[in-house]
Image (cartoon, helix red, strand yellow):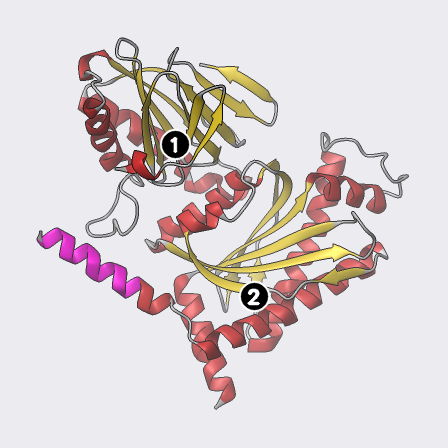
Amino acid sequence: MVKKMDEGERQVFWDSVLELNAFQKDALNELGNIASCHAVTSLAEMTGLTINIAVPTVEVVSIEDAEKKMEIEKMVAGIFVQIDGGFSGYLLVLFPERSALSLVDILMGKMPGETKSIATEMEESALMEIGNMLASSFCDAIADFFQFSLLPTPPSFAFDMMGAMVENVMIVLAQAQETNHVLLFKCDFQEETEGGIYGYILLFPHHDSLKKMLSMLEAEVE
Amino acid sequence: MATEQSKSESEDGVERYYAGIGEMKVAHNPHQLVIMGLGSCIGLALYDGHAKVGGIAHIMLPEGKDGSNTGKCCKFADRAIPLLLKEMLRYKAVKERTVAKIAGGASMFSAMDTLQIGDRNSIVVKEELKKTGIRLVAEETGGKYGRTVTLDTCTGKLGVKTKDGIKSI
């Protein structure tokens, strides 16, 4: 019975740390907004496409719930970057299969629909380049805002089930932090035309970094 | 237990039960047990071919540190195996007849290779099975790809679906 109490206490501890108040939520939303606008602008410049961006969301979710919120088996191209410096965590850029193929067409100057699969290193590196650029400009915007430096590691690439990728990142985070909850910055963007290119940027900050970021945001206001 | 809150779909009278992260599901024939999108997690399948009872657990990490088990009971390998076995015994499975198959334990991105979370997961699950006295008869672990596994409680076959196709172990 003693054990049960311990578990209960710990649960409260995590919840209290990760429960965002209205101010923190607004501040993080705004930060996410700035960073994703910055990232998507650079994507638009690189590809010449007009890209719309949805209002980014910031949520604290448990690992189990995060899994329930997505299409686990959907095939996506994923670019994974680890972030260090003033802030540490992981960033994942995801493009659903069809969008990934269209992006390769655009980047390599091919006819629309010419790329049929992500089979060779050519397609991989084209997508990795785009993902890396999105990740770096996303980080740049955050670093600018807080006036610290962020160092993204070189990107790594996978083309696989969305669930497997997100699960893997969350487990790396859970392993490092012994936490059951992750803070999820989610930003959807979409090309203007119908059925166009869309993608997601997911940011998984380390727990300490999140706390640091929140206190810096609060100091900014005072 | 976990089986009561299971999500299921009917297909020719065959129910499919899905186990999310840290969950376990137990069923008897003709039903199927599914874990979708395994990355570095392990899908553990136990099966008693005589009773035709199967169980799966979606294991996340090798072991929980003291007091860190805040969520689902099957998140950690060392706790999941006894729990899953206990639930199967309730369904009239017999431990001596029960065999295990495992899948998963991948490393999705090369940047994570040094952490070896997937590999460590497989190793610990195998050690725990040995400790519990359950024979491991098949595995499909490691690599750099995601997997969806389906345990057919009629045959005990574990279907492993990856982006390259489906195979049965």
Q: Which residue is mark 1?
A: B42
- Name which residue lies at 46% across and 83% down: A218
Residue A51 locus on image (x, y percent) = 78, 59
Name the residue furthest front: B13
Nearest the viewer among B37 and B132 is B37
Q: Left or right: B115 with respect to A138? A: left
Query: Marks 2 and 1: CB-CB under 8 Å?
Result: no
Name the kind of residue labelled 1 in the image: Ile
Q: CA distance from mark 2 to mark 1?
A: 33 Å
Residue A170 locus on image (x, y percent) = 45, 49
Name the residue furthest top: B50
Name the residue furthest bottom: A222
Q: Which residue is mark 2?
A: A150
Nearest the viewer among A153 and B98 is B98
Q: Report the magenta residues as a range.
A: A2-14
Q: Left or right: A6 with respect to A183? A: left
Please report, as a chain letter, where disc 2 is located. Answer: A
